Amino acid sequence: MSIKVQPYTATPAEPVSEAPGVVVRWVIGEADGAPNFAMRVFDVPPGGASPFHAHWFEHEVFILAGRGHVKTEQGDLPFEQGYVVFVPGGEMHQFVNDGDDVLRFICVIPHVRPGAK
Amino acid sequence: MSIKVQPYTATPAEPVSEAPGVVVRWVIGEADGAPNFAMRVFDVPPGGASPFHAHWFEHEVFILAGRGHVKTEQGDLPFEQGYVVFVPGGEMHQFVNDGDDVLRFICVIPHVRPGAK
């Protein structure tokens, strides 16, 4: 296991099956020896969105480019470049691109572990 | 605990005692209910650097602005905006600003837990 330094674009972009047009790069993960959590970079095209869903794990997000909103059960929360978003586990959420350009964000999640709550 | 959406600059910048001129914002952390890891944003001024040190926990880093290098025991690894850096626990490392502008990066670390390895 060693220190890794590379452009985020060196990681191949993969389609996200539940979100047409959305791609994800797993830029730091278990393959790098990351023991606790993974960093991903998502690109959402204009008019695109992630699924409206909930899951046991949290999201820690930083908006790199573009603008949009998080759809929640309490209403829509707008964001733009330079915003942070924390989604606790169990909360319904959806990232929606409201702009004319790509929405790009970092999303960090814990590794799935036996006994994880 | 609820979904948080705000500019990263809404979090106060704190000085980093071991690194003159460097400031950190804990943009998502235990105060938000984050259960596993914390997201910080560092600003390193031109000519500045983080300490050259090692610790038990890993870093997952994304370079938001500027350019520089990671000093390691295996040599210097250059980076610029859009690079990712993974530093495993136990590896000596230092983030150095080589540019004329601020070096800004996200750095995610696990919470300290009893029994953490």
Image (cartoon, coloured by chain):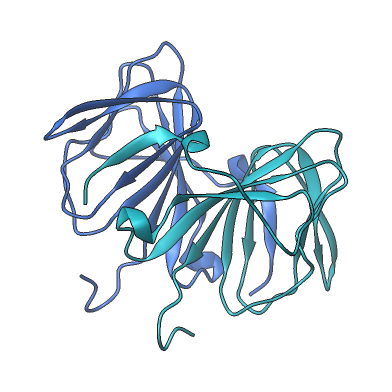
Chain colours: A blue, B cyan
Q: Which residue is nearer to you in this view: B76 or A21? A: B76
| Apparent side of residue A6 relative to residue B33 in the rendered image (left or right) | right
Q: Position of residue B4 (x, y in %)?
A: 31, 41
| Apparent side of residue B84 relative to residue B93 in the rendered image (left or right) | left
Number of numbered callouts drawn: 0
Q: Which residue is nearer to you in this view: A19 or B110? A: B110
**Which residue is at 17% across, 36% downward?**
A52
Q: Position of residue B97 (x, y in %)?
A: 82, 46
List the single residue furthest toward the left: A73
**Which residue is at 47% across, 73% downward?**
A35
Q: Quadrant of residue B60?
A: bottom right
Q: Which residue is nearer to you in this view: B27 or A80? A: B27
B107 shown above or below B82:
below
Q: Quadrant of residue A7?
A: top right
A37 shown above or below B81:
below
Q: Quadrant of the C terminus of chain A?
A: bottom left
Q: Quadrant of the N terminus of chain A?
A: bottom right
B68 shown above or below A66:
below
Q: Which residue is nearer to you in this view: A43 or B72? A: B72
Q: Position of residue A39 (x, y in %)?
A: 47, 53
List the single residue furthest toward the top: A100
Q: Position of residue A53 (x, y in %)?
A: 16, 42
B20 shown above or below A30:
above
